[in-house]
Image (cartoon, coloured by chain):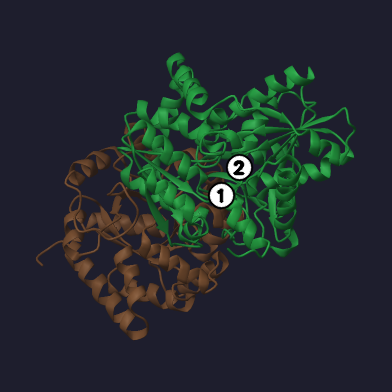
Chain colours: A green, B brown
Amino acid sequence: MKLPDKYGHFGAFGGRYVPETLMPALLELEKAYEHYRHDKEFKEEFQYYLRQYVGRPNPLYYAEKLTRKLGGAKIYLKREDLNHTGAHKVNNTIGQGLLAKRMGKKRVIAETGAGQHGVATATIAALFGMECEVFMGEEDTRRQALNVFRMRLLGATVTPVTAGTATLKDAMNEAMRNWVTTIADTFYVIGTVAGPHPYPQMVRDFQSVIGLEVKKQHQKIEGRLPDYLVACVGGGSNAMGLFHPFLKNHKVKMVGVEAAGFGIESGKHAASLSAGSPGILHGNKTYLLQDGHGQITPAHSISAGLDYPGVGPEHSWLKETLRAEYVSITDDEALEGFNVLTREEGIMPALESSHAIAHVLKLAPTLSKDKSIVVCLSGRGDKDIHTVADAMGVKF
Amino acid sequence: MDRLTQRLATLGEHNDKALVTFVTAGDPDLGTTEAVIHLLADAGADIIELGVPFSDPMADGPTIQLSSERALAAGTTLEGILATVTKVRTSQDIPIILMGYLNPIHAYGYERFCRDAAQAGVDGVLLVDMPPEESGEFLRHAAPSGLNVIFLLTPTSDKSRIATVDKLGRGFVYYVTVTGVTGMRQQTSATLATELAKVRKKIRLPVMAGFGISTPEQAAQVAAMADGIVVGSAIVKLFEQHSGAKLKSELRRLVGELKKAISPGPA
């Protein structure tokens, strides 16, 4: 069975739960995407920018020293951190930007939490000559001031959102509200595999370049497929991009790592799959953090990119069908992951990716040396240095 | 015939227009909501829309967002809202519609909600983020309860979407007059008359026009093109500015003016 179905459902999840005003725009987008994803010229142009602009394929790097230290399975890092703009986000914004151009849209909008997707959207807006407005929770504009400045340098307008909890979910509400109002000339570039259909499918497809490259690279190095895929999950786009090409390879185990914040039992976390329940938010049915009355509860994570109370609907489906396993890592464990990779390999991972690394620190020693783990290093850690310094009690 | 359909039929027979007034349930508390429902009915409202507050109201402008926050801060729940409607119903027969987002209803349980809402005396429900495509499961539970499920149409809805809403909708159709979120606006759209005429020709149900109507002048202008009007933010704004006796007198004044502006006959 090919998922999603024509209504955008992954089993009971996904769909298009949006106000009527948005429906025609989503249907128009779906039609355009259905057409262009089979269009030779579109695909070639997408590949061209991935190669010449993003710098793909990026390496599947064998972390030999870390592997030796842990004494178990071989650890490979998929180096999305080496992409232009420093994370996997740009794979998707290139795709959506090219689609926006073909649909004749002159303006793009985006929501952002950590600022990585905002920067990636502002980047392609500069590249393709489009007007760009990024909505960002006011709280996040303070935590990620450097990325706000970056977006402004790229010519984007950054609009702080003060409503609700003033974080990523509220930025997404505000982007939706803006889109409702400006639908005729505006393309909404969603940064993760969530939101109304066709976004979860479209973002997954654009990000699948990650898994497709891994498949080839691992085959070339090891002569077979990996045993484990590990990636962090906020909305879940880097994980979906890594997992998707392997869905039918049933021997390949897939592990999504959510943010446990101060610990699941503290209630201050962002682990929708591990500790949430199904509901409807931002246009799709999926696992959410909510109270017994269906009100969304605030997420917490040291990593702004994982600080979201929902998750992409296809992850909810993979969890329910047990095709993927979802675990969680606390803020402290993520910091440990950050430090270990930095010291052992000289690579500073983003705090998001540090969650995946932290899980590998637990997983690798339990596996024999002939096994292999591919972990998605979704972004580089430069943007998080201040957060890490804060956590270590260092003042500049 | 249910209360809502009956009321709309009576208005239609007298060539009168319906005034639908929106307030957020629980803003600032459910006690006030209870009193306000009676007051609105008394002041000239024909139908009450009670907003069920949600933490993430993505189709609402700042006025209703803030109102929802006040209601949630006061501890408003769907259980509490239904209890309030039950109390109101002992002495009030104005049609009451619940309007809101799907997640609180989903958390309550579709089947349980439809049964409890109908029992409390709710006449209809309008779920902003449930377009016809995603309404199948909810409609299955709503049908036996007798609740009218109301759908939205907008200036962006095409022929086939209008036909779908005509088929699935009950009670009335809520026509969103602007391509935007809720909130007060200075002007009504120039193409509104044409759009509404087109929709009314294709829809069996009465058509209520809403979003952005705040003054008696706008009310009169839009009411002439539809079967009735919905006023939300302009009323909810009063809850932001006033409380107690002053809130009540302001509500009475605004609703009275609105009803007068849309009523037929010599002004």
**Residue A242 vs residue B65, the one in the foreground:** A242
Q: Is residue A76 found left or right of B23 in the rendered image?
A: right
Q: Name which residue lies at 18% across and 55% down.
A: B187
Number of numbered markers? 2
**Secondary-structure class at tag 1:** helix
Q: In which quarter of the image is the N terminus of chain B?
A: bottom left
Q: Where is residue A86 in the image (x, y as percent from the top left)?
A: 55, 39
Q: Name which residue lies at 41% across and 26% down.
A: A32
**Residue A95 vs residue A103, the one in the foreground:** A95
Give amino acid for label 1.
Lys
- In this rendering, the answer to whether A113 lies above or below A13 is below
Image disc number at residue A383: 1
**Residue B8 vs residue A103, the one in the foreground:** A103
- Residue ranking furthest to the top: A40
Marks 2,1: beta carbons within 8 A: yes
Q: Name which residue lies at 23% across and 50% down.
A: B226
Q: Quadrant of the C terminus of chain B?
A: bottom left
Mark 2 and mark 1: Cα distance apart in space = 8 Å
Residue B85 in sight: no
**Residue B119 vs residue A148, the one in the foreground:** A148
Q: Would you name the residue on which mark 2 appears?
A: A380
* Chain for disc number 1: A
Q: Is residue B152 found left or right of A38 in the rendered image?
A: left
Residue B209 in sight: yes
Q: Position of residue A253 (x, y in %)?
A: 78, 32
Q: Is residue B64 found left or right of B26 in the rendered image?
A: left
